[in-house]
Amino acid sequence: MLRNILAAIVGYIAMAAVLFALFSLLWLALGPSRSFQPGTWEVSGAWALGSVVLGLVAAYIGGRVCARMAHDARAATMLIAIVLVLGLVAALMPVEMAAGPRPDDVSMMEATASARQPVWISWLNPLIGAVGVWFGSRKLRA
């Protein structure tokens, strides 16, 4: 049981690390002008689509890491529960809105703190994570 708990925790940490790396690359690829709507903190369609795809990739990798470490399938179920619970909590938390228009040149840290994504993404993220973990945690075929 302890091995399954550890596998779920390490899987979640792997997801977070992969998300950080992939979103950093997405930011470098798009830059502020293509990551946001002109003059606002609203994310662009390209960013929204990228976040859905990258979330699925990170969850798949987290599920894969979890499955490799786990004793049995319960670890993946634990990781899916963690992803769903934390994702729903994040979707329910009020978001502080950035004041004023967005300057043309913003850092990645400013963008992370001030970006406004559509509400549907906040509710879709836990589902994307659960699906990605489920697919990633399936046993490898020999």
Image (spheres, grey):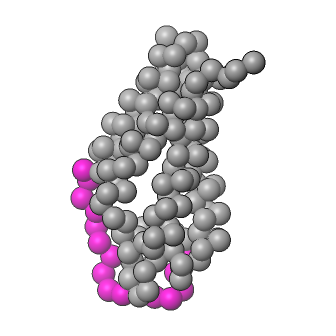
Image quadrant containing the C terminus: top right
Q: Nearer the viewer, residue 113 or 59?
A: 59
Q: Is residue 80 left or right of residue 70?
A: left
Verify whether residue 89 appears in magenta. no
Q: Is residue 98 left or right of residue 30?
A: left
Q: Quadrant of residue 126?
A: top left
Q: Residue furthest right?
A: 142
Residue ID at (58%, 12%)? 71
Q: Quadrant of residue 128?
A: top left
Q: Nearer the viewer, residue 9 or 130?
A: 130
Residue 121 position (above or below residue 38): above
Residue ID at (59%, 69%)? 27
Verify whether residue 94 appears in magenta. yes
Does residue 12 appear in this view?
no
Q: Residue furthest front?
A: 141
Measured from the top left, where is residue 34 in percent x and y? 54, 78
Measured from the top left, where is residue 92 in percent x and y? 24, 50
Q: How many marks?
A: 0
Measured from the top left, where is residue 60 in percent x and y? 57, 38
Prevailing secondary structure of the magenta residues: loop
Residue 129 position (above or below residue 134): below
Residue ID at (56%, 53%)? 54
Query: Start and end of the magenta stretch?
Result: 92-107
Does residue 130 appear in this view?
yes
Residue 85 position (above or below residue 27): above
Q: Quadrant of residue 102?
A: bottom left
Residue ID at (43%, 86%)? 38
Measured from the top left, where is residue 51 in percent x and y? 50, 58
